Image (cartoon, helix red, strand yellow):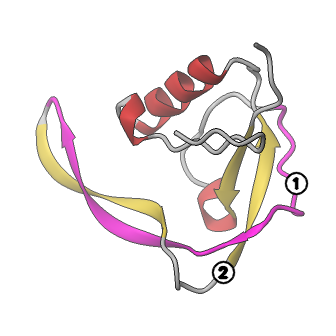
Amino acid sequence: MERNIAVLRWEPATWSAPGPSTDGVWRKDGPELPVEYTLTPNITRRGRNSALSLTLQRGWKRNPVLWSMLATGDVNEAVAVLAVSKGNGTERIGLIDLQGDER
């Protein structure tokens, strides 16, 4: 089933490495979320290291986020594209469906 799928980004992260294919417009009217950078373990084929990642955490200061529409409307494809763009497995990609599903 095709859906409208948006990706959220915190403004400082918008200027970093390229992400998934979007409609090219980063809108500034996104929600305010408790997002901050954290140091997380990163395991790759080359070994273990640490990566600076954006993390959502209840109780943290809320920061405005930007949003853009993904080029795909297929949920499984969107999760796979995001996982590849971040170098993660699909199990590390969060999803909230405004119609009630969460993954």
The three-letter amino acid code for the residue at tag 2 is Arg
On the picture, is 33 further left or further right than 48?
right
Secondary structure found at label 1: loop
CA gap, disc 2 and disc 1: 17 Å
Kindly give the residue lying farthest to the top in the view shown.
Answer: 1
Q: Residue at x 59, y 39 (%)?
A: 18
The three-letter amino acid code for the residue at tag 1 is Arg
Q: Quadrant of residue 15?
A: bottom right
Q: Residue at x 74, y 20 (%)?
A: 72
Q: Residue at x 46, y 64 (%)?
A: 55
x, y (%) of residue 94? 51, 44
Q: Quadrant of residue 5?
A: top right
User: Looking at the picture, does residue 67 appear above or below residue 4?
Assistant: below
Q: Which residue is mark 2?
A: 62
- Give the numbered dot on residue 27: 1
Q: Is residue 69 magenta?
A: no
- How many numbered discs sit on the rendered protein? 2
Stretch in magenta = 23-45
